[in-house]
Amino acid sequence: RGPHPWVGGTDARKDLWKLAGTPGLVISEYSPLTEMHEQMGRARFCFIPRGKSAWSLRFFEALFAGCVPVVLSDQWELPFEQFLRTPEFVIKWPMKRIDEGMVEYLRSLPDEVVEQYREAGRRARCWFLYPPQRADVRHQLQTMHKICTEDSSHNAFHGILLQLERKKRASRTSSASF
């Protein structure tokens, strides 16, 4: 998408721009969303540079587009890392190493390995989606495409509950937990 205000540290977007023109890479800014999503859907890997904070909406878009997210943010702790095996569907790349070596590494991965990442991403992606209301457009999309169906307890709401359950502790002054 477009540039983000500088927030300090390595500028991942600037380093990605240095790779523009590399055969087989699509790096652009200000692309219309429909075009960007189509490109993501055709890609094997999607670069996810940090946004205005340590995370980016592109991570979630990449999971649903079916490309392998390559997270370019050293500080970002991915949601639900406590119970999802994120290294099975995400590649975290050091921000200081955004260069031709990163491209060479990604190109060196065998098709079978890339497909394993993509399949693991398809299995995990619903954990990052909140269940929709019945009148919500997401409900219609889920029904039409049979993605993240309502009968699944693998969604962001349940993920948060799982994390809170693990943080629950017994009170020292009461028989109740909190």
Image (cartoon, helix red, strand yellow):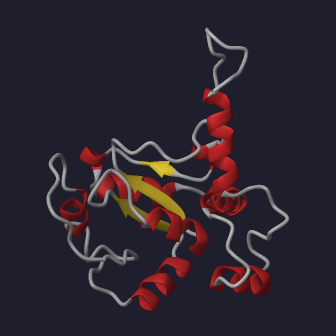
| Quadrant of the drawing holding the C terminus | top right
Asked whether residue 61 appears in the rendered view, the answer is: yes
User: What residue is rendered at 61% in x and 9% in y?
Assistant: 172
Residue 147, placed above or below residue 92: below
Given residues 136 and 34, the one toward you in this image is 136
Q: Please state the horizontal and vertical placement of residue 87, each as a whole percent of the image.
A: 57, 44
Residue 168, placed above or below residue 86: above
Q: Please state the horizontal and vertical placement of residue 30, each as a whole percent of the image.
A: 27, 85
User: What residue is rendered at 55% in x and 68% in y?
Assistant: 67
Residue 108 left/right relative to 176? left
Given residues 140 and 10, the one toward you in this image is 140
Residue 155 left/right relative to 25? right
User: What residue is rendered at 51% in x and 75% in y?
Assistant: 43
Residue 62, placed above or below residue 40: above
Q: Please state the horizontal and vertical placement of residue 42, each as a whole percent of the image.
A: 54, 81
Given residues 85 and 52, the one toward you in this image is 52
Residue located farthest toward the front when viewing the structure as drawn? 174
Asked whether residue 115 appears in the rendered view, the answer is: no
User: What residue is rendered at 43% in x and 66% in y?
Assistant: 57
Q: Please state the horizontal and vertical placement of residue 4, each as a whole percent of the image.
A: 21, 67
